[in-house]
Image (tube, rainbow, N blue to C red):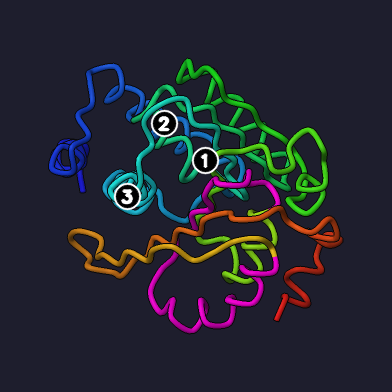
Amino acid sequence: MNPEQFFHELRRHGIELNEQQKEQFAIYFDVLAEWNEKINLTALTAEEDVYLKHFYDSVSAAFYHDFTGNLTICDVGAGAGFPSIPLKICFPDLHVTIVDSLQKRINFLKHLADKLELTNVAFYHDRAETFGKNSQFRESFDMAISRAVARMSVLSELCLPLTRVNGVFIAMKGARTDEELNNAKSAISILGGQLDTVHGFHLPEENSERSIITVHKKRKTPKKYPRKPGLPNKDPIT
């Protein structure tokens, strides 16, 4: 997917980019390619792959959920900024917080945000388990979002403690989500969430499956969650 095809596909879904936004995506690709030579940010380096499998894939969450307005979003394990930075480019009013466990990636994201001239973005070098215990951030975000980071039961423990009551947690996954969701039912409920919608679609061109899972936060998360770093992944809630 080249840039023009990317813009066309977004337009089809009601997302019209201006020239500044289009230029921001071009800068994003250049900065990503430059830094990827120094640190491992992505295995995808060709422009058409980045626009399809990172930029388009990230923005696809907005095909099924409203990202307009001054929403506060926490992106857990964003890596090279996906999905929240492409979403921020498309919806400039978003207030984005990214938490990632690797300082090198945080350094990249700070540099990227400067090059893109983004406002209302914040980056924290931390484990999601620790971040979710911080009273400054706990249950403070309109939305927690994560893309291809961990199993649904694990993601729920990392993201729902950050989501305010009546907010939403969005998990962006690949195919075969039925088993994951079935295994995560107990965790979602214990953590105060309720499964809302699961939207499936195929990426253009390569036709690989994707799923956008939305969980509504109905109740406060018990104080014991998230547990210590590493424990959610080692011993998921069942």
Dot 1 crowding, Cα within 10 Å, few <14, some 14–19, many 20+:
many
Q: Name which residue type carries label 1.
A: Gly
Position in image of residue 117 (x %, y %): 48, 15
Residue ID for mark 2: 28
Q: CA distance from mark 3 to mark 2?
A: 18 Å
Q: Is residue 193 above or below residue 2?
A: below
111 relative position to 207: left or right: right
Q: CA distance from mark 2 to mark 1?
A: 10 Å
Residue stretch in magenta: 161-190
Q: Residue at x 53, y 49 (%)?
A: 145
Residue ID for mark 1: 81
* Quarter of the figure with residue 110: top right
Mark 3 or mark 2, which is nearer to you? 3
Q: Nearer the viewer, residue 40 or 196?
A: 196
Q: Does the magenta portion include 170?
A: yes
Instruction: Tell how many labels.
Output: 3
Q: Secondary structure at mark 2?
A: helix
Report the disc number at residue 60.
3
Q: Residue at x 62, y 62 (%)?
A: 155
Which label's residue is closer to the chain start, 3 or 1? 3
Q: Residue at x 78, y 54 (%)?
A: 129
The quarter of the picture where the C terminus appears is bottom right
Q: Name which residue type carries label 3.
A: Ser
Q: Secondary structure at mark 1?
A: loop
